[in-house]
Amino acid sequence: MNRLFDGPGLRWVAAALVVFNGFFPALWILLTSLKTEAELVSKPITWLPVNATLQNYVQAFTDQPLLRYMANSAIVAMGATVFSLIVSAGAAYAIARLNLKHRQLVLTAIVASSMFPLVTLLVPIFETMRTVGLLNTYTALILPYVVLNLPVCTLVLVSFFQSIPRDLENAAMIDGCTRVGALVRVVVPLAAPGVFTAGILAFVNAWDEFLLALSLNSSASMRTLPVGITLYQGEFSFPWPIISAALIVAIVPVAVLIAVFQERVVGGLTQGGLKG
């Protein structure tokens, strides 16, 4: 018993709790998506589906245009990720390499800008998009997402850019590269783990965002996944097995993306923490 609560034992217990806390909700949603409505409300609760069925997944695609919602989310998330990386790379390079006055104050301002609750920004963003005629467009979501992703992406990239020797950029510029060319051809490739980390964070944030997607794109053809999934419930009914199936469909692309780039993301987060 004492061994369980010594140093290594505590680490294993803590790791098990973190894993359980992270995976149990997703596992429960997956099991719910395989149950019938009758089995879900039966008592006592059945942890595993007695008669597993894929009918909920079929209904998830037929009751609502789920593929359309996925396509909208993919376009918005990829667009926001690309532009977030472009803007944040430029900002991070300026902070890490140029002789800016009050550099620390700039970083503090970037961090402070991410502390405003999104609900306080909703009305100004909505009025701006309505004034310029961008409501119910992909751009209406991509532009705010770029702004919202900018602080975290910039902070991640700053720590990586600062770790790259200046001599490599100087050598590239001596060979004829401009400063922008050195950034694109030398700095960004060497900071690939940080770029992947920032990109994944930006993509997930845009993929999961609900409030702006609900407010700025009210057209049925422009709804994203988080908004579309809320439409499965009726006025007096909550088809949880079908909703769970739609949630699993929404989780899969992000899970695959993180699994593919797992080593780069983990390496980027840990190296960024050590270098920062």
Image: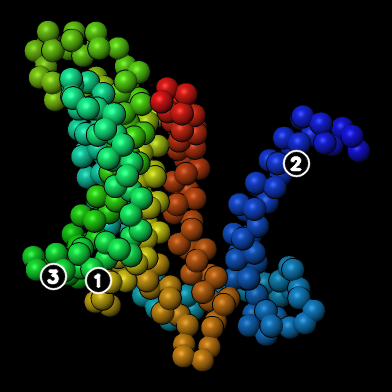
Tag 3, which secondary structure? helix
Q: What residue sits 36% from the left and 33% below the top?
A: 156
Which percent across, then down, holds residue 163?
35, 18
Near-viewer residue (184 or 1): 1
At x 34% / y 34%, what residue is drawn? 155
Image mark for residue 217 = 1
Compare residues 41 and 58 and report the one nearer the observer.
Answer: 41
User: Mark 3 — residue?
Assistant: 130
Picture coordinates of residue 225, whole percent (x, y): 38, 66
- In the visual, does 147 lie left or right of 57? left
Distance from Cα at disc 2 to Cα at disc 3: 52 Å
Q: Is residue 98 visible in this depiction of the protein?
A: yes
Quarter occupied by the N terminus: top right
Q: What element carries label 1?
A: loop
Residue 144 location, quadrant: bottom left
Task: Please name the amino acid that badge 3 sits on.
Answer: Arg
250 lies left or right of 102: right
Residue 81 visible in the snapshot: no
